Amino acid sequence: MIRGAFAVVFLSVSVSSASDLDKLKGKWTAKVGANQDVEITVEFQDRLILVTVPDGNGGEIQLEGEYILDDKASPKKIDLIRFTSPDGQPIDDNLGIYEINEAGDELKLCTGGPGQDRPDAFVPAGNDGRGTVVLRKKK
């Protein structure tokens, strides 16, 4: 369950667009999981991304990685790279696409899942780490 919850949000960013990069910086939240009842937090920094997910026992697990944006592509691309699992094992890169609204407070992210191909369209989220999640910026 936890792997599926955070697999959807892995990202990797190279500085390609000041406007998208600036809009992404900060903390975002989303409800994920089969019942949309698992709250995750994603924090974008300059090149780092921190993903916080519940551990299922009342605590949290924090994952750290990098993200790369390609805002010239259509759809825009995001790569989540250099993540490790809680036990220190590397997690395969997770390739995705994204949209960020004009106001910069809603991020639609769709990934193929770790080690899988990048999706070419936004598809519903599944339990396998693939699919779309909508994150809202924390104020």
Image: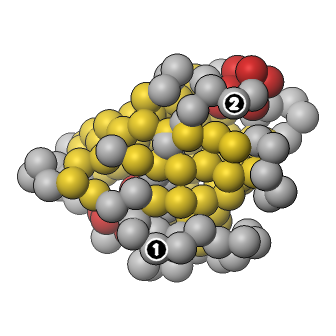
State the residue in front, 25 or 119: 119
Q: Earlier in the sequence, mark 1 or mark 2?
A: 2
CB atoms at circles 1 and 2 under 8 Å apart? Answer: no
Q: Position of residue 58 (x, y in %)?
A: 22, 48
Q: Is residue 119 above or below residue 64?
A: below
User: Which of the colour schemes (rainbow, by chain, secondary structure, one colour) is used?
Assistant: secondary structure
Q: Is residue 43 above or below residue 120?
A: above
Q: Residue at x 69, y 43 (%)?
A: 70
Q: Is residue 84 in view from this perspective?
A: yes
**Left or right of 43 in this view: 6:** left
Q: Position of residue 113 (x, y in %)?
A: 46, 69
Q: Residue 5: which quarter of the image? A: bottom left
Q: Residue at x 33, y 44 (%)?
A: 82
State the residue in front, 69 or 121: 69
Q: Of the numbered discs in the image, which one, if any, rests on residue 52?
A: none
Q: Of the numbered discs in the image, which one, if any, rests on residue 16?
A: 2
Residue sitting farthest toward the right: 102
In the picture, which quadrant includes the N terminus?
bottom left
Q: Of the numbered discs in the image, which one, if any, rests on residue 116?
A: 1
Q: Residue at x 64, y 72 (%)?
A: 119
State the residue in front, 120 or 56: 120
**Left or right of 86 in this view: 126:** right
Q: Position of residue 38 (x, y in %)?
A: 43, 58
Amino acid type indicated by mark 1: Gln
Query: Within 10 angstroms of label 1, few (less than 14), some, or many (20 or more) residues?
Result: some
Amino acid type indicated by mark 2: Ser
Q: Residue 125: which quarter of the image? A: bottom right
Q: Is residue 133 in view from this perspective?
A: no
